[in-house]
Amino acid sequence: MTALTISEAAARSGLSAHTLRYYERDGLMLASVDRAVSGHRRYTDRDLTWIEMITRLRATGMPIRDVRRYAALVRAGDGNEAERLELLMAHRERVEAQLAQVTSHLRAIDHKIGIYEGKLDQTA
Amino acid sequence: MTALTISEAAARSGLSAHTLRYYERDGLMLASVDRAVSGHRRYTDRDLTWIEMITRLRATGMPIRDVRRYAALVRAGDGNEAERLELLMAHRERVEAQLAQVTSHLRAIDHKIGIYEGKLDQTA
DNA sequence: GCTTGACTTCGAGCCGACTCGAAGTGTGCA
DNA sequence: TGCACACTTCGAGTCGGCTCGAAGTCAAGC
C-alpha cells in the first residue's frame, strides 16, 4: 500500500502526470484517487494495477469512451460480469481482425522490400 | 488503362472521394491525377496501384508525412532505392514491434476474459 | 433545353487524445 | 525563514487525419 505521488505513478506507468489527471477527470479511474491532506494525489497499488489495465486497453486501440464504459461496469460492482465479458470479447475480436489485417499488409510491404533488396544487390 | 472517376476510384480503394482529394493535395500521389477536359479527375490503374500502396502504409500506421516522403522518393525516380529501402525497413521494424506489443497486451486481456468466463460458468 | 446529380476548389470544422500554461498552493531542505 | 520545485485546477491549445459545406461547373438522360 505504498502511496505514490503523481510523478512516481507517471514514472511507473509510463504515462505523463498530465495524462493521469486527464484519465481521472475523464472517468477512466475506478474511483477518485486518494488525496494527501494537502490535496495532492496519492496512488495506491490498486490504482496502478487499474492504470495498467487501461494501458493495455488503450494500447490495443480501445477508444477512451469504451474504457470509460468498462470502468463504469467495474465500478458498479458485482452482477454485470456478463456485460464486461461481452465488452472485452468484442474488443478482442476487433483487435484480432486488426492484427490479421496489419500482418497481411506488412507481408505485402515485405514483398516490396524484397524487390528493392534484389535491385540493390544487382547494382552493388 | 480504364480511367475511373473519383467516385469509382473511391469505391475501388475503399477511401472516400474527400480523402482521395486530400491525399492528392497533401502530396501523397506520385503525380497530379489526370483530368478530363471538364477538369474532373480520371484515375488510371497506376494511380489505383499506388493508392493501394498508400493504404497499406497507412493501415500499418505510417504517418502521412512519411508516406509523403516515400512518395517524393518514388517520384524522384531511379537512384534513391537505398533510401526507399531504408524507409520501408524502418517502418517494418516499428510495425513488428507494435504487433508484438499489441499481441502481448491482447494475451493479458485474454487472461482477464478467461477469468470472467470462469466466474460466469460457476454462477450459471 | 432542362434537370439532377457528380464533379471542382477552398477554407473551415471536427474528433480523439492528449498537452500545455497560468495562477495559485504545498513540501522539503539548507 | 527562504528557496526551489512539485503539486493543484481550469480552460485552452495542439496535432493528426480526415470530413464537410459553400459556391460554382459539368454531364447524361428525358
Image (spheres, coloured by chain):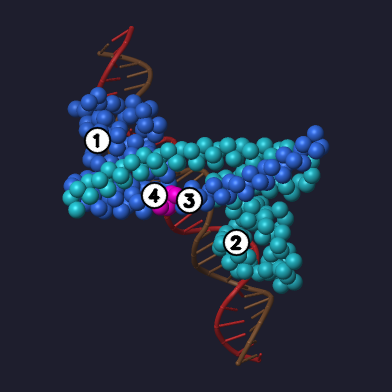
Chain colours: A cyan, B blue, C brown, D red
Q: How far apart are marks 1 and 4 (CA)?
A: 29 Å
Of all residues shown, which one is farthest toward the right?
Answer: B123
Q: Check if mark 4 and mark 3 are on a common chain.
A: yes
On the image, numbered disc 1 is attached to which residue?
B33
Q: In this view, does A1 lie above or below A49?
A: below
Residue A8 spot, x, y in % from top left: 62, 69
**Image quadrant in which the N terminus of chain B is located:** top left
Q: Which residue lies under the disc numbered 3? A: B98
Q: Image quarter for residue A108? A: top left
Secondary structure at numbered mark 1: loop
Residues drawn in magenta: B91-96
Residue B117 disc label: none
Question: Disc 2 designates what residue?
Answer: A13
Q: Mark 2 lies on which chain?
A: A
1 or 4: tag closer to the N-terminus? 1
Helix or strand or loop: what does disc 4 sit on? helix
Q: How crowded is mark 1: few (under 14 residues within 10 Å), some or many (20 or more)?
A: some
As measured in the structure, the alpha-carbon distance from the residue carrying label 2 to the one carrying label 1 is: 47 Å
Q: Are marks 4 and 2 in contact (CB under 8 Å)?
A: no
Counting labels gives 4
* Residue A80 can be seen, yes or no: no
Q: Name the residue under label 4.
A: B92
